[in-house]
Amino acid sequence: MRIGYPCVNESLDCTTASTFRLASYSDERVEKAVAGNLACLRRILEYNVQHNLRFFRIGSGIVPFGSHPVNTFPWQTHFAAEFRALGDYIRAENLRVSFHPDQFVVLNSPDAGIVQRSIQELVYQGSMLDLMGLDSTAKLQIHAGGLYGDREGALKRWIATYHTLPEAVKARLVVENDDRLYSLQDCLRLHEAVGVPVLFDNFHHECLNNGEPMPLALRTAAATWHPERDGPLMIDYSSQAPGERRGKHVASMEEALFRRFLEDLRGLDADIMLEIKDKEASAHRACLIMQEVGMLVAAAQSASLGSPAVS
DNA sequence: GTGTGTCAAGCAGAG
DNA sequence: CTCTGCTTGACACAC
C-alpha cells in the first residue's frame, strides 16, 4: 500500500505549474517553464521518498499548452533525459504516479471538437508517463463526463469514443466515480463494456451511490483492476468539510474517519490518494496511522526488507 | 513591490 | 441569465 497526495507540495518553495498566458506564447517560455517544473517535480518526489509518501498525482501543467496546437516546441525530445531520469527514480524507489486531466477532458461530449481536444490532452499527459518509461500501472484518471439529459446515450458515446483512443492512452486510462452524475454503478457499466478499471473515490461514493456499503463498494472497484497490467486499486480518499456545502473536501484529515475507512478496506491492497486541502500534512498523518495499525512498514524498514519472507 | 482580475479548454445546478 | 465549483494556482498588468 502506498499513501499520496495530489499535485502540490506546500512544504517546498517550488511549483510544477509554472506557466504563462497564451497571448505571450513563445518556445523559449515553454522551455524555461518545463525545465523549472520538472526540477520541482524531482524535488517533490525526493521529499516524498524521505517521508515514505510513495503515491503522487502529477499536476497537468508540467508542459504549458501541452496539448494545444500553439505549442510547437519539441519538448518530448528536448527533455527526454529529464523525463527518463524521473522515471528511473520513480521505479527505483517503488513510487507510483498518476495524472488527473482536468474538467475539460470530456470523452462523451456530443461536440466532436471537445472530444478531439480531450483525446489530445490524454495523449499529452500519457506521453509524459511514456517518456518516463513507466509501465501501465501509472494511470490517467478521468470522470465519465456530462449527462446531457440522456444518461444511456452519454454512456454509449463514452464507450464509442473509448474504442477510438490510441492504445497508449487505453492502457493507462481509468474512470472515477463522481459525486453528482456518474456513480460507481455507472462506472462499472463502462468497465463491463470496455474493461476500463474503476478508480474508487470514497467521498464521491458517500455523496452518490446505489446503496452499496463501503466494504462492498471497495471490493467491487478493486475487481476491475487487473493485478499485473493495472497494479493495485487506486483510491481517492476524502471526507466532508463539517458545516460546509455538501461535497466540499475537508481542510485536514479527520483521523477517526480515516481509521474507519482503513477498516472498511478489510485487508484489500490499494494505493490511497488523500484529496485533502492541506496536502502532504494530512498524507503524513495518514502514513503514521497506517504504520501504527501495521498496514504500512516504516520508511527506514522498507528499503532493507527486500523480498517478502515466506514462512 | 503589492493587489487583483483573469487565465485554453466543460458541465451542471444554484441563485 | 449569470455565477460557482470542480485538485487549484499563477500570470500580468495597474498602481
Image (cartoon, coloured by chain):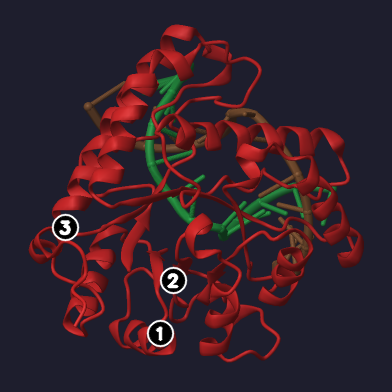
Chain colours: A red, B brown, C green
Q: Which residue is mark 3?
A: A51
Q: Quadrant of the N terminus of chain A?
A: bottom left
Name the foreground residue: A208 vs A185. Answer: A185
> Quick one: SS at disc 3?
loop
The residue positioned 18% from the left and 77% from the top of the image is: A291
Question: Earlier along the polypeptide chain: callout 2 or callout 3?
Answer: 3
Residue A225 on image: x %, y %:
56, 66
Label 1 crowd bin: few (<14), some (14–19), many (20+), radius 10 Å: some
Residue type at tag 3: His
Q: Kindly indicate whether the residue at mark 1 contacts the one at mark 2 (C-beta within 8 angstroms).
A: yes
Question: Earlier along the polypeptide chain: callout 2 or callout 1?
Answer: 2
Question: Earlier along the polypeptide chain: callout 1 or callout 3?
Answer: 3
Is residue A309 shown to the viewer in this render? yes
Residue type at tag 2: Tyr
The residue positioned 47% from the left and 78% from the top of the image is: A240
Any mark on residue A261, and which? 1
From mark 1 to mark 3, how far is it between C-alphas? 22 Å
